[in-house]
């Protein structure tokens, strides 16, 4: 391995067996970091481009405003409604935008109804 460090020594610090570490090292020697990180062949250009095309066809909007709300409104909603951080974030996104929520989580359903968010299903 690197500078006289053997695979069993490395295995004590990472969740891999010495054999897996040696395999990763060999892949790195063969093809660099990309080859080391992926033990299977990459999908190739056509499947990746098809996936990216399909992804672009979705109406995905990045909500840059939400990043600042995580420690404020989301945290307040989580404490007030007794929700997980994830559930409070979903609720916080739905409230100002008037979006409906689809969930089977009973606590989130109750919190949604109490804040006027429409439930789907």
Image (cartoon, rainbow, N blue to C red):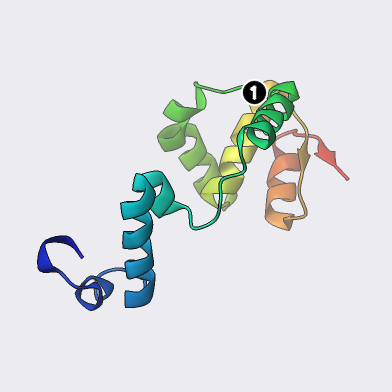
Is any part of residue 111 visible from this angle? yes
The C terminus, quarter of image: top right
> Which of 107/33 is in front?
33
Residue 90: x and y, percent? 63, 39
Horizontal and vertical percent position of residue 75: 47, 41
Quarter holding the N terminus?
bottom left
Is 38 situated above or below 23?
Answer: above
Quarter of the rendering containing residue 111: top right
Horizontally, residue 2 falls left or right of residue 45, namely: left
Q: Residue at x 56, y 47 (%)?
A: 86
In this rendering, would 120 be left or right of 38? right
Residue 17 visible within the image = no
Residue lying farthest front? 30
Q: Residue at x 52, y 48 (%)?
A: 85
Q: Is residue 43 left or right of residue 27?
A: right
Q: Is residue 39 above or below residue 58?
A: below
Residue, disc 1: 96
The answer to which image quadrant residue 24 occupies is bottom left
């Amino acid at each position: 391995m690197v500078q006289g460090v053997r695979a069993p020594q490395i295995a004590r610090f990472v969740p891999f067996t010495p054999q897996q570490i040696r395999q990763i090292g060999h892949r790195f020697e063969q093809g660099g970091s990309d080859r080391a990180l992926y033990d299977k062949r990459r999908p190739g250009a056509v499947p990746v481009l098809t996936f990216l095309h399909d992804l672009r066809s979705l109406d995905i909007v990045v909500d840059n405003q939400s990043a600042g709300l995580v420690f404020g409104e989301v945290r307040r909603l989580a404490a007030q409604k007794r929700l997980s951080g994830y559930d409070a974030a979903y609720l916080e996104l739905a409230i100002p935008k008037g979006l409906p929520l689809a969930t089977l989580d009973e606590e989130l359903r109750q919190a949604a109804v109490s804040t006027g968010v429409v439930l789907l299903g």
